[in-house]
Image: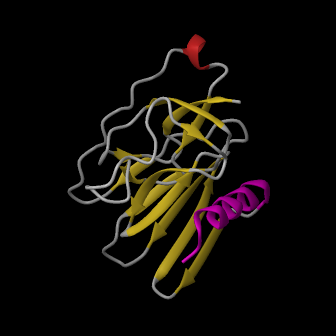
């Protein structure tokens, strides 16, 4: 299975090329990317009965939202939009994938971070579970967590802000 960063790179390469469709299959996993006009979509399947994930090509400045289609899945609660003036100088830690957000490694464990926690770029701030895989999300910046934007156990979308960090 490809890592999230490898999938991102594939999306960028397909988006920058004149290829209209790209398919990758390996050991029951399938990644299919199609361009529609100036937009690109990614479909990733693990098993024929597994969920499909549609993600637009990432934008250099800020990733676009993703439409999730899963059988019998409830729609995720919308994340509150932070005020524009207050967040101009804050770094957003965004979800690199569609999945379930967890603040800690287990229900009994303390949260990795909370508002006021100091983080380094390598600090693990949460876990996003996607298709039975638990992906540790790093802060990517040194600073202080200002706000946690999602609740534990909430379904998150690709590119959805999870934390606001005041960089050092």
Is 16 colored magenta in this rendering? yes
Is 120 colored magenta in this rendering? no
Quarter of the rendering containing residue 21: bottom right
Q: Position of residue 53 (x, y in %)?
A: 44, 59
Q: Position of residue 109 (x, y in %)?
A: 32, 54
- Residue appearing at x 35%, y 65% in the figure: 51
- Residue appearing at x 58%, y 73% in the figure: 2
Residues 76 and 82: in front is 82
Quadrant the C terminus occupies? top right
Which residue is the extreme one toward the left? Answer: 72
Which residue is the extreme one toward the top? Answer: 85
Which residue is the extreme one toward the bottom? Answer: 27
Q: Position of residue 63 (x, y in %)?
A: 61, 41
Q: Which residues are magenta?
A: 1-18
Residues 27 and 93: in front is 93
Q: Position of residue 14 (x, y in %)?
A: 72, 61
Query: Mostly what secondary structure, the magenta segment?
Result: helix
- Residue appearing at x 79%, y 59% in the figure: 17
| Position above or below: 85 against 127 | above
Quadrant the N terminus occupies? bottom right
Residues 153 and 66: in front is 153
Q: Is residue 124 left or right of residue 51?
A: right
Q: How is the image coloured?
A: secondary structure
- Residue appearing at x 71%, y 61% in the figure: 9
């Amino acid at each position: 299975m490809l890592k999230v960063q490898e999938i991102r790179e594939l999306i960028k390469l397909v988006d920058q090329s004149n290829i209209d469709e790209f398919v990758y299959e390996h050991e029951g996993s399938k990644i299919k990317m199609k361009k529609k006009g100036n937009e690109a979509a990614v479909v990733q399947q693990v098993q024929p009965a597994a969920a499909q994930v549609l993600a637009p090509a990432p934008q250099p400045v800020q990733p676009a939202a993703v439409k999730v289609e899963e059988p019998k899945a409830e729609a995720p609660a919308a994340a509150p939009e932070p005020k524009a003036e207050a967040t101009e100088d804050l770094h957003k830690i965004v979800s690199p994938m569609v999945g379930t957000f967890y603040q800690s490694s287990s229900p009994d464990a303390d949260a990795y971070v909370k508002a006021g926690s100091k983080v380094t770029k390598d600090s693990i701030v949460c876990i996003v579970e996607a298709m039975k895989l638990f992906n540790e999300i790093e802060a990517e910046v040194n600073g202080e967590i200002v706000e946690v934007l999602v609740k534990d156990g909430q379904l998150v979308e690709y590119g959805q802000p999870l934390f606001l960090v005041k960089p050092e």
